[in-house]
Amino acid sequence: MTTPITTWSLEQTSPADLSPARLPKSATGGELVITRAGVPSPEFSRFFYGAVGGGHEWTDRLVWTDEQWRAYVEKPGVETWVAYLRGTPAGYIELEAQADGVVEIAYFGLLAAFQGQGIGGHLLSEGTARAWDLATRWEGREATRRVWVHTCTKDGPHALANYEKRGFRVFTVKTDEE
């Protein structure tokens, strides 16, 4: 039996496209902090990939070796930004710089216990802003001129709407059988 999976590719082509979400009420008073993981950690990235992606059938990196994880997270222009609610990791957004001033939001999501609280909109807003200024943190990197992401029907039910609310525009829709 096959299942149709629809994938949407979305983009922003200017920092002015970003429409930031409000800080969720549950996270006021400094209780929600988003910070860059300053030390590339394959274990930390693998944890988030499995913990967030497990509920969405993410599989492409499950076969990665420790060395593949290390090579990826240590690649110049790859950044992991983490949302902490009251000191507890709540979710992450992974940015990957590509050629010609392009930055992909490679992975983004929240742990199940933190979904439905408005944290995702805020994390996506902050992560997208960091994609736009990524070149300022990497010597020799071309200024960002495009930020893109893809999502599919296997992702959370609000994923596509969240991207669109943040100012991303669909540029490709594809449906495949799985």
Image (cartoon, rainbow, N blue to C red):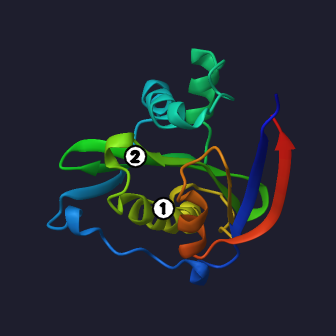
Task: Describe the element under mark 1 as helix, strand or loop.
Answer: helix
Observer able to see residue 74: no
Task: Describe the element under mark 2 as helix, strand or loop.
Answer: strand
* Looking at the image, residue 57 lies above or below residue 162: above
The residue that mark 1 highlights is: 124
Q: Is residue 97 left or right of residue 158?
A: right
Observer able to see residue 135: yes
3D distance between C-alphas at marks 1 and 2? 10 Å
Q: Which quadrant of the rendered structure holds the C terminus? A: top right
Q: Amino acid at mark 2?
A: Gly
The residue that mark 2 highlights is: 91
Q: Position of residue 144 (x, y in %)?
A: 66, 67
- Residue at the image position 32 percent from the left and 59 percent from the top: 117
- Quick one: label 1 or label 2, which is nearer the N terminus? 2
- Residue at the image position 50 percent from the left and 68 percent from the top: 129
Residue 142 occupies quadrant: bottom right
The one nearer the camera, 139 or 17, is 17
Q: Is residue 73 left or right of residue 35?
A: right
Q: Amino acid at mark 1?
A: Leu
Mark 1 closeness class: few <14, some 14–19, many ≥20 residues within 10 Å: many
- Residue at the image position 35 percent from the left and 52 percent from the top: 35
Residue 146 occupies quadrant: bottom right
* Looking at the image, residue 71 lies above or below residue 121: above
* Looking at the image, residue 3 lies above or below residue 7: above
Asked if the residue under mark 2 is in contact with the one under mark 1, i.e. CB atoms within 8 Å, the reply is no
Q: Which mark is residue 58?
A: none
Q: Position of residue 95 (x, y in %)?
A: 57, 51
Q: Position of residue 23 (x, y in %)?
A: 30, 71
- Residue at the image position 53 percent from the left and 66 percent from the top: 162
Q: How many marks?
A: 2
